[in-house]
């Protein structure tokens, strides 16, 4: 299987962190629907990052 590029791994890590930060900022401003969407996007990016970096494949 092809090894993922370092850029893609770092990009997904930063993108996941940015979604979490945006979710916290939205929740603090009482914009709960936007915060929920941000958390879903952070979870999706985190799952993709996990699949890229898991060992044994």
Image: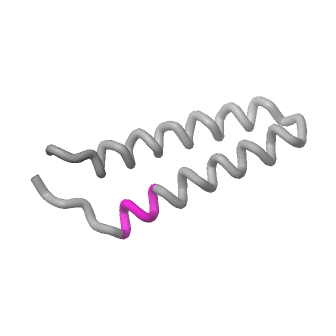
Which residue is depicted at the point 86% across and 41% down?
28
* Residue 3 painted magenta: no
- Give the residue furthest to the front: 55
The quadrant the C terminus occupies is top left
| Quarter of the figure with residue 11 | bottom left
Which residue is depicted at the point 65% across and 47% down?
20
Residue 16 x %, y %: 54, 51
Which residue is depicted at the point 18% across and 60% down?
3
Residue 15 x %, y %: 54, 56
| Quarter of the figure with residue 40 | top right
Residue 38 x %, y %: 65, 40
- Give the residue furthest to the right: 29
From the viewer's perspective, is residue 4 above or below residue 56?
Answer: below
- In the picture, measured across the screen, residue 42 lies left or right of residue 3, that is right
Q: In front: 35, or 55?
A: 55
- In the picture, measured across the screen, residue 24 lies left or right of residue 13, that is right
Q: Which residues are magenta?
A: 7-12
Q: Main secondary structure of the magenta part?
A: helix
């Amino acid at each position: 299987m092809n090894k993922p590029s370092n850029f893609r791994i770092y990009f997904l890590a930063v993108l996941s962190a940015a979604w979490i930060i945006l979710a916290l900022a939205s929740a603090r401003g009482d914009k709960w629907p936007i915060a929920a969407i941000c958390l879903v996007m952070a979870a999706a990016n985190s799952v993709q990052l996990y699949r890229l970096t898991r060992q044994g494949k």
